[in-house]
Amino acid sequence: MEGEWNDSQPIYRQLRDRVVNMILEGVLTDGDALPSVRTVAAEYRLNPLTVLKGYQELVDEGLVEKRRGRGMFVREGARKALVKDERQAFLDEQWPEVVSTIRRLKLDLEELLAQARRQLDDEEKSQ
């Protein structure tokens, strides 16, 4: 997790989003322990209640489970559920804007697909 916070949303929400991104990127996988509330609070100079609130959102969403006396752990299937939700959010929220831009700029769909394939190929080669 990076240590920079911004004023665009509450820190607990930013912390929640960072953990979600770590799950989506495979940094945290099913069964992995989250860093303890105390560790995160000390490392990023946050109030432990702020960290706990961010973690609690993950529990409420069914992505993380509390294990009494042991900590918080990524639930089985959390990444799969997140990917499904992210895909749907992209299609519902961002894709209509993309389509509108394509239409407004009169972009060629075949050319766009070719460009997308090139970029994806380049990314795979660089990894």
Image (tube, rainbow, N blue to C red):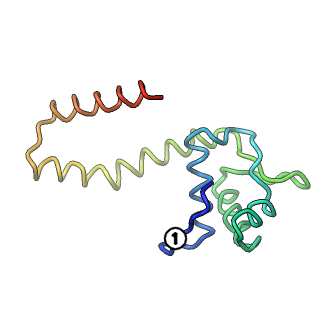
Q: Which residue does the image show at 18% across and 53% down from the upper left?
A: 100
Q: Which residue does the image show at 49% across and 42% down from the upper left?
A: 84
Give whichever of 44, 48 is nearer the camera. 44
Q: Position of residue 101 (x, y in %)?
A: 17, 52
Indicate left or right for 69 with 104 as reference: right
The 10 Å Cα crowd at callout 1, few under 14, some 14 to 19, many 20 or more, is: few
Q: To which residue does mark 1 refer?
A: 6
Indicate left or right for 123 with 44 as reference: left
Q: Which residue does the image show at 71% across and 45% down from the upper left?
A: 74
Q: Position of residue 5 (x, y in %)?
A: 56, 68
Which image quadrant is residue 80 in?
A: top right
Secondary structure found at label 1? loop
Q: Which residue does the image show at 63% across and 56% down from the upper left?
A: 61
Q: Position of residue 111 (x, y in %)?
A: 15, 32
Relative to 96, is 81 above or below? above
Indicate left or right for 20 with 94 as reference: right
Residue at the far right: name it: 69
As shown in the figure, which amino acid type bears the numbered disc 1?
Asn
Q: Position of residue 81 (x, y in %)?
A: 57, 43
Relative to 95, is 45 above or below? below
Indicate left or right for 90 with 48 as reference: left
Q: Quadrant of the N terminus?
A: bottom right
